[in-house]
Amino acid sequence: MLLIAGLLDLGFALFHAAFGRLFGWPERLAPSGSLNTAITQTLNAMLTFVFLAYGATLIWQAGQGSIHPLLPLLGSAFWGLRLALQFIWFDLKPWSSKLITAVFAVTTVVHLLAIRG
């Protein structure tokens, strides 16, 4: 499960790396102002880095055969929070929103299951 959790996090890194192309950045961010555009793109770049580092660490731990339960526990907390925020801030009617909500739920559970090793 630890390997799967790491691969999911690397997948989210790739997904976030594609945000500029997927969402038409920076042009579609421009109406929010240059500062908000810069902040949004910077936060996305930093989150992409975190997903890369975290996913690589989980994969490395899986290869070591030992696991510190804090890492997958924190990952599960992260994804559980992201799942909760999906219900608060996003429209759940589009199929794409339903799909990503399901992916967040699965990712939360995978990280929880990875705690056991």
Image (tube, rainbow, N blue to C red):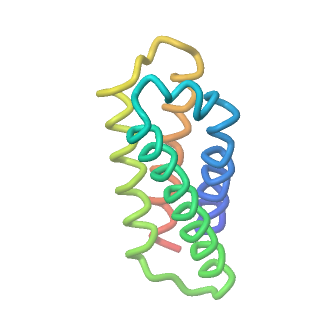
Q: Is residue 14 left or right of residue 58?
A: right
Against 69, residue 3 (above or below) is: above
Q: Give coordinates of residue 88: x percent, y percent.
A: 29, 27
At 55% from the left edge and 32% from the top edge, which residue is drawn? 100
Q: Give coordinates of residue 13: x percent, y percent.
A: 62, 54
Against 84, residue 12 (above or below) is: below
At 41% from the left edge and 76% from the top edge, which residue is drawn? 69
Query: Which residue is nearer to you in this view: 52 or 77?
Result: 52
Query: Which residue is nearer to you in this view: 51 or 64?
Result: 51
Against 86, residue 75 (above or below) is: below
Q: Residue furthest left?
A: 88
At 65% from the left edge and 73% from the top edge, which residue is drawn? 59
Q: Quadrant of residue 86?
A: top left
Q: Is residue 76 left or right of residue 25?
A: left
Query: Which residue is nearer to you in this view: 63 or 44?
Result: 44
Q: Quadrant of residue 72?
A: bottom left
Q: Give coordinates of residue 1: x percent, y percent.
A: 60, 64
Q: Residue furthest front?
A: 34
Against 77, residue 104 (above or below) is: above
At 41% from the left edge and 57% from the top edge, which residue is drawn? 76
Q: What is the count of numbered marks?
A: 0
Q: Give coordinates of residue 77: x percent, y percent.
A: 35, 56
